[in-house]
Image (tube, grey):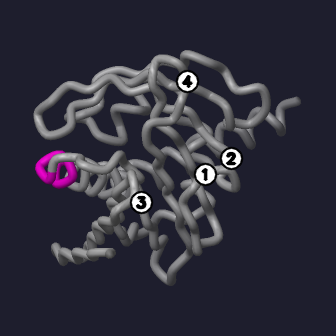
Amino acid sequence: MRMHIIIFLKSVVILIKMSESETEDLVVDHELQDVTPKMLDWWWNHIDTKERYKLWHPKDHKSFELEVSPKKGHIGAIHLVLEEIGGNLTTLRIRTEDPILVPISTTYSHVQASSILDDNDNPISWVVHEYEATQHGTRMRSTFRLPAGIRQRFLEDLRKHCEEEMSNLPKFLPELYENENKQLNRSVLQE
């Protein structure tokens, strides 16, 4: 037996799928004005300092460090982060994954996939941000696959945290992306 709960808040649709399986999905849809998929593709590869990580959520993101460097690109990187979700400080080990290997189906053309790891490097939950271009920016869907039995309050806090993170992107990412690419273009021209 499957039960679907749909909650409508402002311009965000939240779908929580509950099943008899061992997981629950929290799905949050976002509309990001003036943020392109290309900017987001760049962003995932350039969240590489505490300062940048805090840009994404100035209130809840406390610390960021690279525990394992990726061998190529960003897949395989493990980030150790301290975040506040619903007033609770949480240390997370987040590994960037190959989207093809993550057990969450996607439909959009751009995908960023991660897992939350236990101390033995086993995934205990999965996160997928998938997105596509729209006329005024990007449509994004964030899916969190979590262990079954997660408290409803945590799901609400995680939804709020995710909404806030994504609503911050239009505030800084277009300018950061433009400035970083101008700087890169200048250095290439000087060589």
Q: Where's the N terminus, which quadrant?
A: bottom left
Say which quarter of the image contains residue 60.
Answer: top left
Residue hosting label 2 = 98
Q: Residue at the bottom extreme?
A: 135
Residues drawn in magenta:
152-157
Query: Mark 3 = which residue?
Result: 142
Q: Kindly identify the amino acid type of the residue bearing the numbered disc 3.
A: Ser
Q: Disc 4 or 2, which lies upstream in sequence?
A: 2
Give the labeled residue for mark 1.
Answer: 102
Secondary structure beneath label 2: loop
* Identity of the residue furthest to the right in this view: 191
**Residue 170: x and y, percent?**
38, 58
Name the kind of residue labelled 4 in the image. Asp
> Which structural element holds mark 3?
strand
Mark toward the start of the polypeptide (2 vs 3):
2
Query: Residue 147 vs residue 152: left or right?
Result: right
